[in-house]
Amino acid sequence: MKTIVMGLFVILIGLQSCNSQKKNENKSATTTTISDLSIYNLPSQWTTQNDKNIEMKDLKGKVLVMVMIYTSCKSACPRLVADMRHIEERIPENLKDKVQLVLVSIDPTVDTPKRLKAFSIENKMDGNQWLFLRSSEENTREFAAVLAVNYKKISPMDFSHSNIISVFNANGELAFQQEGLGVSYDETVNKITEEAEKLN
């Protein structure tokens, strides 16, 4: 965990602009400024399953649960998607609106907004709490490094990749990571709940 946090720190420091940090206007956030470790410092542009362009800072103010997948995956990704659905089901009802579940594609060539939208519907992940993102190959690699996710193309349609679910607090700072497929997600749900309760 220490290695991941240090890696995150180094990457985000390198990406910071010279501008002074902006105040976090969300009154319910635990601090008023964005720290050096926040993913909200990332300048990359992303496109959602609804073909809307956003930056990471647009997600500010919610607890983020993130995983990197690709929609044509037939092995690990369906299990990661199932884990994300099970995690969402266990979030207390009164806290669900404070949590955003984000699936980031590692295959932006295939995973167009139209494909991500179809995938979200196929997997019953088309509610407001679900967000699918794609970007350029460069931005995707950069973000994968922040999450400590490794991936490599091993054939025209297949990737090998890390199986990590990451939890970020409302200030965009890494709070917890779960690695592996089909493992217990009790700790993940507990951390999501803990961070979301701070926003009440």
Image (tube, grey):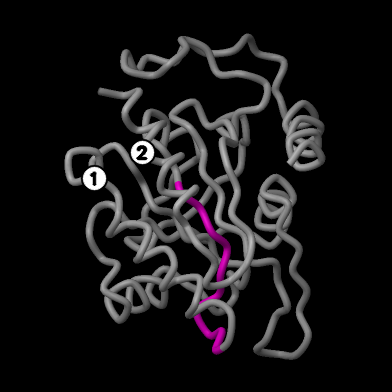
Q: Quarter of the image containing the C terminus? A: top left
- Determine the image quadrant of residue 24: top left
The location of residue 114, given as percent across then percent down, is 37, 74
Q: Is 147 positioned to the left or the right of 104 in the image? A: right
Residue type, label 1: Pro
Where is mark 1, residue-wise?
92
Counting residues from the start of the chain, the first of labels 2 and 1 encountered is: 1
Image point 76% across, 63% down: which residue?
A: 150
Q: Quadrant of the N terminus?
A: top right
Query: Image check: 82 left or right of 184?
Result: left
> Taking 116 as reference, is 13 above or below it?
above
Marks 2/1 in contact by CB < 8 Å: the verdict is yes
At label 2, which amino acid type do we have? Thr
Residue 88 rendering spot, x and y as whole percentages? 32, 57
The residue to which callout 2 is attached is 193
Determine the residue positioned at 72% across, 15% down.
Answer: 18
In the rendered structure, which segment of residues is drawn in magenta?
Answer: 65-74
Give whichever of 80, 37 is nearer the camera.
80
Q: Is residue 111 magenta?
A: no
Distance from Cα at disc 2 to Cα at disc 1: 7 Å
* Residue 66 covered by magenta stretch: yes
**109, above or below 199, in the image:** below
